[in-house]
Amino acid sequence: MRIIILATFLLWISSSAADAQKNLTTAELLAKSSPNDWRNLDPENTVYLELEKGRVVIELAPEFAPKHVANVKALAREGYFDGLAILRAQDNYVVQWGDPNAEKPEARKIKNGKATLPPEFERKIDSKMEFTRLPDDDVYAKEVGFWRGFPVARDPKSHETWLIHEYGMVGAGRDNAPDSGGGAELYVVIGQAPRHLDRNVTLVGRVLKGMELLSELPRGLGPLGFYDKPEQRTPIKSMRVASDVPANERTNIEVLRTDTFLFRQLVEARRNRREEWFVRPAGKIGIENVPVPVRVK
Amino acid sequence: MRIIILATFLLWISSSAADAQKNLTTAELLAKSSPNDWRNLDPENTVYLELEKGRVVIELAPEFAPKHVANVKALAREGYFDGLAILRAQDNYVVQWGDPNAEKPEARKIKNGKATLPPEFERKIDSKMEFTRLPDDDVYAKEVGFWRGFPVARDPKSHETWLIHEYGMVGAGRDNAPDSGGGAELYVVIGQAPRHLDRNVTLVGRVLKGMELLSELPRGLGPLGFYDKPEQRTPIKSMRVASDVPANERTNIEVLRTDTFLFRQLVEARRNRREEWFVRPAGKIGIENVPVPVRVK
């Protein structure tokens, strides 16, 4: 009897809470977030791309691309990227950085990192992995959702999961051979999600802050958006692992957790927009249109 | 008997032609295009947005938004936009232009055009309308495909069709009231397709050339990406209907027709990419990732 009353009471509590938040907008939901809804970045899996105009903060995903992430960190730690440049800006596609002389004798030498690696296009699903599934379908994959803030796809038949190519995702450029990438040349998506790249190239992380420093860059006029004149390239001051940067010089940001009730409410508030401006809520959402909020502490 | 032979012969011809083109890439298919695969723009439904750095060519879609298109042309013809400015650049969303003083007493006066119009969010399907349906599903709509080069969605139950919000599409900004837009303030999508805007705001056309002049603009730092300092705005030299521009000053571009066998082959070449670089063709495609090629004559 006591158990039934308790269960009824809990049901009442939770449905009242849900009712109360039913019509909240994204902004209103975020205003109600508790500290526990947010997580800190792991400085050991965060890199800073430093440009003249500011810092780009990238969160790495070692659970999806362990070898590439380790290599990007090794390259950053040996100063490989320092003084290299942004080489390519293709409209509605990618911005890419690396060594302008990579194919020439004067190419920057790699010391501790590796020039190339076997691909890490997908991994097996581990039942312990966080996965907040989106309630809507996806054109390209059987299931899509979020793993620790990253957009991921799943194939329940093959038990494989992979990171999704969308705005702000960072990957390791490669040539035609699947094992010709490794992280010495990195790209970031600056336009419509190029989902045809999924499982064709290794994604290593995503930009959490400073995206406009890359998306605003003048588009390159050479083939594939490569700059045809060296002076059009943007120099890279440095690329550093956050844990190697003094604590007081780090960018202290928090990312909304995606394994929470609040995040599921947020997804619902995006599927059916409650802002007064909307006259016809979509009732659905594509994975690429779900924002994962970030805030500076 | 003769009919059967003829039919068999035609079948053989068409399947040989299809076989021959089965593994062609987008570039190879385009190289094989005939003049009839391309169409000219109607200068009466083309507008030029002239900026210091160059010209943005916009094709209008009067079949979807007749009142708004007529009004944008009327406003362009009375010089309404000349000397106004790009007011907003919100990262991964839109760039918007209009009168910085629209809410103030010194607002630019509208002479022949209209300040606002009833919404044109969708229209009834006309059985005579061209529609090349995409073979894949869409997250947001029952059917998607192309009408004269424009990405469109359809609901076969309600017999309605509407233009799709994706990269380069141009719409008429509005306030909360659905009839508060009209074309005096225009926006263009510069990031991930904001499909939640479909049927919530009137689209009038799309950018065919010069998109990078808008997508490269520095993002605004005010709320919603509006520029917080007037000097950050980009001045508009003029906006003109192409037919009012001397023929030798027009941008002579052709757009690939989307009602052809070639275009369907092109869609297939994007669903299953044949370029050597790809190791795992997606087998599907989202409408927003299908390019409609444009060439300068």
Image (spheres, coloured by chain):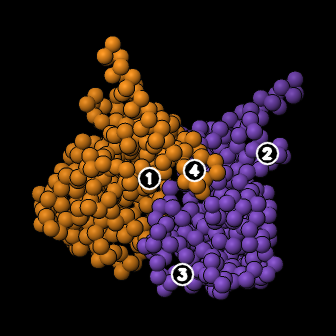
Chain colours: A purple, B orange
- In the image, which disc is placed on residue A196? 4
Q: Circle 3 marks a residue in which chain?
A: A
Label located before the other in sequence (4 or 3): 4
Q: CA distance from mark 4 to mark 1?
A: 19 Å
Mark carried by residue B28: 1
Q: Nearer the viewer, mark 1 or mark 2?
A: 1
Kind of element beneath mark 2:
loop
In the rendered image, is residue A63 in sight? yes
Asked if marks 4 and 2 touch (Cβ < 8 Å), the reply is: no
Q: Which mark is residue A55?
A: none
Q: Which mark is residue A234?
A: 3
Gap in angstroms between the C-alphas marked 4 and 2: 21 Å
- Which amino acid, by three-letter code, is at mark 2? Ile
Q: Nearer the viewer, mark 3 or mark 1?
A: 1
The disc, 2 or 3, on the residue closer to the chain's N-terminal end is 2
Q: Classify mark 1: helix, strand or loop.
A: helix
Q: Amino acid at mark 3?
A: Thr
Seen at 25% across and 70% down, the residue is B50
Give the number of the mark in front: 4 or 1: 1
The residue beneath circle 2 is: A125
Q: What's the CA distance linking mark 1 and mark 2? A: 39 Å
Local crowd at mark 4 within 10 Å, few (<14), some, or many (≥20)?
Answer: many
Q: Do residues under tags 4 and 1 come within 8 Å of each other at their CB atoms?
A: no
Residue A243 appears at what percent x and percent y?
A: 79, 76
Question: For residue B113, what is the image quadrant?
Answer: bottom left
The kind of residue on which mark 1 rests is Glu
Closer to the observer: label 4 or label 3? 4
Separation of marks 4 and 3 at Cα, in angstroms: 28 Å
